[in-house]
Amino acid sequence: MRLILALAVAIAACGGEAARSLPPPSSAPQAASSAVPSIDVSDMMGAFPPTTYFVVRPGSVTALALLNHATKYTIPIAAGDAQVATATQAGRVYVLDQMREGARLRWFQIASGAEVRSQLIPGASVVPTGSGHGTLAFDSSNGEVFALLRQGPTMAIEEFEGFTLSPVKRRLGELRCGERVLASAGRVVLACLGEGGLVVEGGAGAGKFSARTPLVAIAMSANGTLMAGSADGRLFRLAPAAVELETIDTLRDERIRLLSDGLAAQADCCFVVGALDRVANPKITVFWGGFTLIRFPESSAPSGGLLVQPPFAYYTVGKEARHIDLQQGFAEVMAGFSDSVLPGAVADR
């Protein structure tokens, strides 16, 4: 018996020594998508929902699967700027691009990429954002789609029925400025970022608001709570029925430098903030008041802002589509492309 016990201890010791001799796993972001093994795990043992991340590249919108990082399908787009939005519960992805005759609005099935409806807006032009989102929005509370379009010397927010894409009405017209449009809980918001101006149309608390400083990011949660931010980290919140902007200096006091389009809603309670900092790898910090801060390295700054579908935030850096775990901070390259890509939309489908 003693001999058997001694032998068992020796084997355990050897195994433990072998384990200690292995290098510790690295949590740093992978340098290229080719470094990620191509393992087709269809459900990740139920750990994560089957999310689809839509990225915009020249000539197409690419649908990437979270679970195995595979390309599910691509949607051809015309040359120039394109905007993407999702209606997750309805299983739709909307794509707005520019044709010679005018702006074209289409929707596709998220599951298959099959085109279902198309609508041409003659003489209209897509308003560029420097990203794959920002001037196209879907309001799940009423099933309507909203697009900020240039028509001649001015702009307008046009409303479309979500399934047929039939024009409903013009919500705001003859606009002299406008860079972003948001829609949620029956509210439609126009942002004039350079002027720091916000126009809220529909629902309680409608009106015009001014942050009195240029804005670089704006987001709205499903319950209609609006959040905007300036480059120096100052945030401005407008609750659903509020009559004035609330100024929040929590991040500004930390000398946070907000990313362009570096705000995204996370449920009704919280917002995710993207910032640049002198860090080697992305880092997660949770602040009191419902803010999750992602500090990105200055050397690999995201382009086109952030998207959130818990438990991940999605973004792009150069020619790579990436995501980061909002709880543990693990960042990963999902796919690499031959051209620069921009974040379009995300859906838990």
Image (cartoon, rainbow, N blue to C red):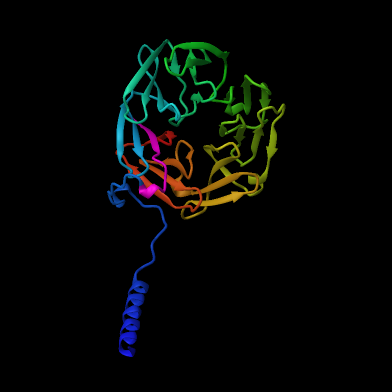
Name which residue lies at 35% across and 51% down. 31
Q: Is residue 152 visible?
A: no
Q: Is residue 268 left or right of residue 100?
A: right
Work out which residue is located at the far right of the displayed protein and give it.
243
Q: Out of 52 and 91, give the one closest to the viewer.
A: 91
Question: Considering the image in quadrants, where does the C terminus appear?
Answer: top left
Residues shaded magenta: 44-59
Is there any visible trace of residue 305 in the rendered image?
A: yes
- Residue 108 position within the rendered picture, expressed as x and y whole percent measured from the top left: 36, 24
Per the image, is 130 magenta? no
Q: Quadrant of residue 210?
A: top right
Q: Residue 70: x and y, percent?
A: 30, 41
Residue 29: percent from the left, percent from the top?
40, 52
Q: Residue furthest front?
A: 1
Q: Above or below — where is 63 with respect to 275? A: above
Return the x and y of residue 256 as percentages of the image width and height.
59, 46
Tell me the residue at 57%/46% (across/down). 292
Q: Is residue 182 left or right of residue 25?
A: right
Q: Is residue 336 above or below residue 61?
A: below
Residue found farthest to the bottom: 2
Residue 7 drawn above or below residue 107: below
Q: Residue at x 43, y 36 (%)?
A: 348
The quadrant where residue 334 appears: top left
Front one among 12 and 233: 12
Q: Quadrant of the N terminus?
A: bottom left
Does residue 55 belong to the magenta stretch? yes
Q: Nearer the viewer, residue 241 or 344?
A: 241
